[in-house]
Amino acid sequence: MAKFFRRFLALIVSIAACPAFVACTNGYVKDGGFGYVGGPEYHAADKIVGGGDGRTGLAEGVEPIDEGTEAPKDNEPVRPAGLITASAWNDNIYYEYFLKLFDEAVYEEIEADDSSSDVQNSESGEKTGETEKRLITPEGRFYHFYDHDRWGFDTANRVTVKVTDGETPVIGAKIKYYGKDQREFYSVTDARGVAYLFPETEDGAITVTSGVNVATSSFTAENREITVDMSAGAQKEALIKLMFVVDVTGSMGDELSYLTNELADVINRVVKDNANVKIDLAFLFYRDDGDREKFAYYDFMRVTESQNLNVQLKNLAKQRADGGGDYPEALDEALEMAVEKNWGEENSTKIIFNIYDAPPHEKDSNKACYERAVRRAAEKGIRINPVLCSGAGLLCEYLARHAAIYTGGHFVYVTDDSGIGNSHYDPDIPNAVVERLNDLMVRLIDGYYTGEFASPVSWKDVDQNG
């Protein structure tokens, strides 16, 4: 029922995007050649802004998309990048706040609302007859998952490991913890030389490996921040391996045509801004069981070569929202498939942006698959950055934040500020900065590679002329 409602809203949005609607709606640019949802802040004197800085063009030496490709279709508006708004949050930086989400929940009992969607009812609290329980405060909203079903995750005992060679961070060092319970946990140091482990015991020993060098250390309940000195560690390569894993089911239709432009802009900017860095790009698009095309994978290509960049941009541009049928999708299978692709043996910067609006199915096999994918990503040093779109709910937030915190990534969520798409889930994060999604992604990619993350800039403060 919830998915049907979202598809109905997506149909309304698509009708609104037709030329006749554009001509009579103040929120659309009439003469500039673009049509998009939004208010007057997106245009001035019929001049397109947000994409007017050249960021929507292809990289130097890349030919435009051939006319024979599927996108854009003749009856679809061409939209500039920089329209979607989003926020990013790093739970490893704000770890104490993250733990408060698992405090014992405080509920109030209110009269049940029969008109609410099945998704909202299932995620807002326990129903009891004609009343239902709703959380009073945002703290404790993960308590239900911790108390009943953790999807295999336990984040209560984080260990922070910093590996250095004197004052120099050792990047790509592999951390292994072998627990008393016979379970193994892995992580890989980032560009700051930092890695995070989440063992399920309060004390234990770790092994650190970089190149041919091996060191050992230990942690206790009182000392969970460890520094390991390791000389002559393996050198980081000037290589970024970037993959976008995108839900392209029907419920993504309200945002997908905008998202493809945002992603194309991100890719072009990263290629242009990193002339001395090799960049390998892959895409994995997914739907669900029973769909004609459940997965569409485009393997890593060296997009610093203009021909390969053009090929991958075509693969992105031809995507259409279709399929699905119920709320959950094949998120777990897609993420595991993405992580198990050939990420290479180089000491590179590995990044996944996982863009979706629905959780996996909730069978035991799905839960095990999702946990396995996240832990495997942590072992490979892949930074997962989930991006929640309209339709996502509490379970999506819970799973997204665990994928991010386990792998040293960021939790990203699209916001309502742009007016694009259906209503978005608000995780109620304190002092969150709303950015342009394309700027946010570029900022994160640069940060993972350099180890220095630029401060977020509010979408309202961005110079619309570049």
Image (tube, rainbow, N blue to C red):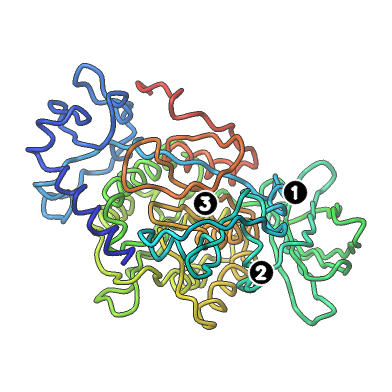
Secondary structure state at the residue bearing disc 2: loop
The vertical placement of 242 against 4, above or below, is: above
At x 42%, y 56%, the residue is 355
Q: Residue at x 64, y 54 (%)?
A: 408
Which circle's residue, 3 or 2, is located before the other in the chain? 2
Q: Earlier in the sequence, mark 1 or mark 2?
A: 1
Q: Which residue is mark 1?
A: 96
Q: CA distance from mark 1 to mark 3?
A: 31 Å
Which residue in the structure is indicated by mark 2?
A: 153
- Residue drawn at point x = 54 percent, y = 66 percent: 344
Query: For the residue marked with disc 1, what is the amino acid?
Result: Glu
Q: Is residue 263 visible?
A: yes
The answer to whether one can see residue 282 in this image is: no
Considering depth in this image, is 233 or 322 the residue closer to the camera?
322
Give 466 or 129, whichever is nearer the viewer: 129
Please give the residue where the numbered disc 3 appears in the rendered image: 240
* The image quarter in which residue 214 lies: bottom right
Residue 217 drawn at (x, y percent): 89, 63
* Residue pictured at 40% horizontal, 66% vertical: 118
Disc 2 crowd, CA 10 A, few/some/many (<14, 14-19, 20+): some
